[in-house]
Every structure is written in structure tokens, then in C-alpha cells.
Amino acid sequence: MPKPKYTTHLGMVDILPDESPKWRALEQIIHEEAAKFNFEEIRTPIMEQTELIVRGVGQLTDIVSKEIFAFEKGDSHYVLRPELTAPVVRAFVEHHMQQRGGSQKLYYIGPMFRAEKPQKGRQRQFHQFGLEILGSDDPIADVECIAFMMRIYQRIGIKNFDLKLNSVGDPESREAYKEALRAYLKPNLDEMSELSQKRFEKNPMRILDSKEEEDQPFIEQAPVIQDYLNEESKEHFEKVKSYLDDLGIAYSLDPHLVRGMDYYTRTAFELTSSDLGSQDALAGGGRYDLLVEEVGGPSTPAVGFAAGMERLMIACEELGIELAEEKSVDVYFVTLGDAARKWALTHLPKTREAGLSATMDYMSRSMKAQMKDANRENALYTLIIGDNELNEGKFTLRNMKESEEMPLSFDEIIEKLTKKLL
Ligand code: AMP
């Protein structure tokens, strides 16, 4: 076939009709489980102010330094959202959502944009579902957040995963740890990557997240934050761990897990799966007690996670999990001649009102071609309509699977099909 003149941008993917049912099925699962947790959905615009993302995600993160799609129009600086924590916090502050009372438990599903080098499981437009709980610093919130995340995978049947857990401490613990980390890294700094050298003063903890080869030997030997947690952070972390134990949620401790964003405090977690290839992270999250204030709101503790939906789809494929049932249509009206087509057109709405799915040929094709099309559409029944049938008021209803046929009036057909199919 000739190469098309226009294609999607690099790393941007069409979700075609054969794929969209599984996306809807996944979205449905997320909505159902969120309802069981009493979480509420939030939908924010695709574009945000660049300044919000720079502040909210952090100037020195990969996302902000390399991956945002940003442009200007008039005096406004737009960015395609690379994640949703900062936008949800923006919405929380903008709409004074703390006034709704209690903690806000907000989940979302939607596309995100990052100018990354595309590969399997890594796109420039990809989808995440996630949750942000704002207004609680109780370890219960951390654990409910993790439990919701795990529940989605459990319900789908993905089991081979590793939940990595860490505490990155509160500001006091982090300062003590950063000091120790700087003291340890300083003598070796010349041998480390340029990015790590840049991060050294402002946020040395991010160095632990470095993927650069030359940094790895130093990272392996680095002091761990657990030795620098103050009593409060320690107690919080102990509670998170013990509640996870109570729920039977297995985890492994990873003292170098700092996650990509600057705003995390205390709990940090990441979910990886051996069912994925090199891009093995399914989801990640943590506590971000400082972010609401950072973007101009009242001091509000918060915790959340984001999960990659393409990655989840890949895991399903690897495991042979079908998210959606095979598509079908209840009844296909096969029409012979103009009068039959008109009759079909006016009886389709009645069929649909009865709760059935129904379609007809839009291309004036032969009966043979229509029967073939009905098979392609996976029709459960066909209804054959010609001049004779119209005169007699009886139509041939064919069960496509069992190849049974019977002549029935339209009302009888509807009654029979609704009893059988609904
Ligand atoms: P993050 O917001 O970076 O913590 O990412 C959370 C999850 O989103 C990751 O664990 C991945 O599953 C997914 N994800 C992040 N970036 C991409 C991407 N470029 N393409 C596909 N999935 C992604």
C-alpha cells in the first residue's frame, strides 16, 4: 500500500475501533472500583499554564527540563499536561475545594503528553488513570490509595508485580539526609554525569533516580534515607507498612526509590511488573504534603498515584487477558429493494428502543453481500425483509449461530429477541 501523506506525530497513537472496546472496558472497571471506594472523578483541561507545571513538577525533573510540549499564544504560555497531580492541585486551590469539607478523593482518567523517545510502552501521548487524596496526612490515606491502585490490577487479573516502597521523609528528615548525601557525593562529583552535577546543590536526592551509567556505582553505595528519618516520619512509615501488612498487600522496601517529581514527601511507591519489557513500571505515586502550598494554596497534606494505561494493556496482552468481549450486534436488517430499506430504517429505532442493538446495510448491496457483512459484524440474528415479507407482515428471523430460521411478525420478533438477549 502507498505510504500515506499524513500520519500521526511521532509517539502519538490512534486507538482504532478494534481497540477502543478494551479501553472502554478498562475505563469502566476504573469507574466502578472508584465508586466502591467513594472516590469522585475530576476532569481538567488538556492544557495548563507552563508556570504551574514547572513549579508543580519541578524545574530539574526530566519532565520539565526535556519533555514538555509548550507553546505561546498571545501573552499566554501553554503546556500540554505531562501529568495530573499539579493540575488537580491547581483545581483544588482554584475552586477552594477544601470548603467542600473532609478530604477530597479525586480520581481521573485521561491523556498525558511527554516528548520522550518512543518505544514499546513509552509514547508521547499516553493515558493515565490516577488518584489524588487531598487533606489527610493519615497513613490510612496512603494505604487506601495503594489499595485502590492494586485493586484495579487484581480485578483485571495481573498478578506478577512488585510494589516497591520507600519513605523520602518530611522536610526536616530530607534536609538531614541531603546533607549526608552531599557529603558522600562531593568527592566523586567530577566523575558523575552532568545532570547529576546540576542536581547536586538543589536536589541531590534526585541523583538517586539517575539512569546515567557513570552515576550507578556511586548511587549503589549512597547512604539511605531510612537512617535519617525523624521520629514523625518513621512512625508514619511504620504505620503505612503495618496497614499494608493488615491488608495482605505485599511490598519490598527500596531505599533508593525517590520517584521523578520533586514534590514527594514521606511515602513513595512504584509498581513494576515482570510481564512488561524494559519499560516495566505500571504505576507510581506517593505523598506530596508540600505541593498545595507550593502552588499558592493552604497547607494541605496529600497523597496520590498515577498508572500508565498502555502499560496495563501490554501486560494484558502478554497474559492473554481479554478486557472486552468480542463485539457483536443483536440484529442485522437484510433488505431487498427500496420499500424494504425504508421499512428497515423506520423499524431500527423501535428495535433499539426495545434495548437491542440493530443495524442495516448503508450501501444498497446484494442479499449475499449483506449476509456476508452481517457475519463480519458478528450479528446474532438477521432479519430478512423483501416485498413478500412486507405484504404478509411476516419476516424471516435467522439465528446466525444455529442457522435456524422462522417467519414472525415484527412485534413477535422484538418480544422473542428481548426475552432471549436482554
Ligand atoms: P509518572 O507520572 O512518571 O510517575 O508515571 C506513572 C506511570 O505512567 C508510569 O509508571 C507508566 O506506567 C506511565 N507512563 C509514564 N510515562 C509514560 C509514557 N511516556 N508512555 C506510556 N506510559 C507512561
Image (cartoon, rainbow, N blue to C red):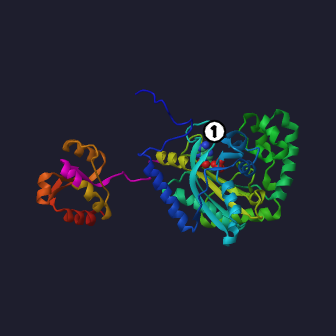
Q: Nearer the viewer, residue 315 or 369?
A: 369
Give me the residue at 55% from left, 36% from top.
Answer: 9
Q: Can you give x and y, in whole percent of width and height, for residue 290 in the image?
A: 77, 59
Residue type (three-letter) at the residue carrying disc 1:
Glu
Instruction: Decide which of 380, 331 is in the foreground and name it.
Output: 331
Q: What residue does disc 1 label?
A: 116
Q: Can residue 210 be seen in this snapshot? A: yes
Rendered residue at 63%/62% (across/down)? 145
Question: Which quadrant is home to the N terminus?
Answer: top left
Residue ranking furthest to the front: 74
Q: Nearer the viewer, residue 350 or 209?
A: 350
Q: Which span is picked out in magenta?
A: 319-342
User: Quadrant of residue 289 in the image?
Assistant: bottom right
Give the class, few, some or many, for how many residues have Cα within 10 Å of label 1's Cα (few <14, many ≥20).
Answer: some
Magenta span includes 320: yes
Please give the name of the residue rendered at 85% of the width and 54% of the height, measured from the top-left corner.
175
Q: Secondary structure at mark 1?
A: loop
Q: Is residue 320 left or right of residue 369?
A: right
Is residue 322 among what the camera can see?
A: no
Mark 1 CB within 8 Å of ligand 1: yes
